[in-house]
Image (cartoon, rainbow, N blue to C red):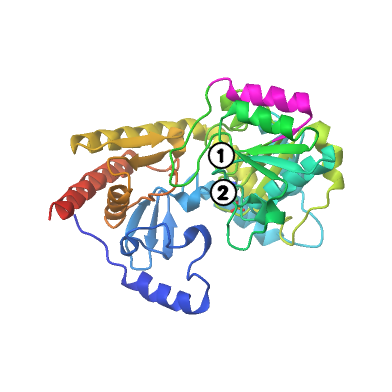
Amino acid sequence: MKTYEYKETTALFRRAAKVIPCGVYGHFAPAPYVPVDHYPFFANRAQGSKFWDVDGNEFIDYMCGYGPIILGYNHPVVDEAFQAQIKEVDTTSIATPQLVELAELMVDMITIADWAFFAKNGADTTNYAVTIARAATGRPKIIAFKGGYHGTSPWMQAPGHHGVTKDDLRNIIRLDWADFAQLERAIDENDGQVAGLIASPYHHPIFSDNAEPEPGYWQKVEQLLRKKGIVFIVDDIRCGFRLNLCGSNELYGFKPDLICFCKAMANGYPISALVGTDALKTDTAKVFHTGSYWFGGAYMAAAIACLKEMQRIDAPKILKEKGEKLFNGMTDIAKGHGLTLSVTGHPSMAYPKIIDDPSLMLHQDICGESTRRGAFFASHHNWYITTEHTDEDIQRTLDIFDDAIKAVKKQNAR
Ligand SMILES: Cc1ncc(COP(=O)(O)O)c(C=O)c1O
């Protein structure tokens, strides 16, 4: 199979490194992409399940913008809604009616939602949620789980993160995922001090196995938090709308007080939402939180169209079926080569990993070789799929994966 070259990517990256810290920063940075020369870093075009890089190479995409693309790139229904509204009005000096329409739709869709609030990025909503928890309880501390990611504000980072001080983390209690006894102990030791607990519906740390909750786990947490008057915040930014259109908590049978949404909400158009229960509506109204672009009517129109389209086609069902097909196929191919692919997390956004080499070099090499053959695989992060990934895309991906394993085995045999 032909392997790609990245002359234009390399030239652009050299220019970027001169004028941009890190060249390409944040989660699009090259750092986790090893071997780095197997990956593209600049795209020119995208459509459906695919994007094309600046060298003209075509990729079946399994990162989907790290989650925002759920209905496929350039989805006509969402794009038309956006275009129609942006021609009329987007950001102006007052809100547009889409603000109300979108809030009504989300209150209708999301089981626990009595109200909705909109921003741009995921961290806008996780920051708001913890502030609301503190305002509502008058307490300072927030419980989160080790390896959980809620954005890049200092309080959300692990100790030792560059630029983060002890003071930033003073009121954050980081616990092991799914250790209920540890959670009970932490709440007892900080009696009357804990304002909220923030967690994703299931654990999806990078470079590590993902973990769905054991049956009954969230129900026990919910009961404990209610008893102690602690606000229960679900960060559904990554899982939202991929697992369940009523909130991912519904899949696992529990009810939080606040849910943060962002990725997948508008198929790539920038918008995020915090939804909550009536009990927190007054305190939420008291906490001032806003941003220059948070009232963009066109982005809200895109979200309305995306949410309705996901409902119409039952997007989570399609994603689960496609994910199962992909990961079952990959597991069989790995097995055929005497390798083990572990697949953790929900099939619609699982984290696949070749586990035969604990250093992860083998896994990284196979992901890199697959990418330079046209299937964009990340080795460090859960993957994503869109409703537009076709059976042909999946079959082509399996062929690429097979060829990539053969290539890596050949290289390692030298
Ligand atoms: C679970 C989770 N929470 C919060 C965030 C932060 O979202 P944003 O980068 O849009 O601020 C992310 C982003 O990847 C995320 O995956």
Q: Residue at x 65, y 26 (%)?
A: 221
Magenta segment: 215-232
26 left or right, relative to 256: left
Give x and y (percent) for residue 309: 56, 39
Query: Distance of mark 2 from mark 1, alpha carbons?
Result: 8 Å
Circles 2 and 1 in contact, beta carbons < 8 Å: yes
Q: Give, as a three-letter code, the residue at label 2.
A: Val
Is residue 217 covered in magenta? Answer: yes
Is residue 46 covered in magenta? Answer: no
- Which SS type dominates the magenta stretch? helix
Picture quarter with the C terminus: bottom left
Q: Residue at x 37, y 60 (%)?
A: 52
Relative to 332, does residue 128 appear above or below in the rendering? below
224 left or right, relative to 379: right
Residue indicated by mark 1: 309
Instruction: Give whichever of 62, 129 is nearer the camera.
Output: 129
Q: Give SS at disc 2.
A: helix
Relative to 99, does residue 339 appear above or below in the rendering? above
Q: Earlier in the sequence, mark 2 or mark 1?
A: 2
Give x and y (percent) for residue 386: 45, 43
Q: Quadrant of residue 261?
A: top right
Q: Give, as a three-letter code, the residue at label 1.
A: Glu
Report the number of discs.
2
Residue indicated by mark 2: 78
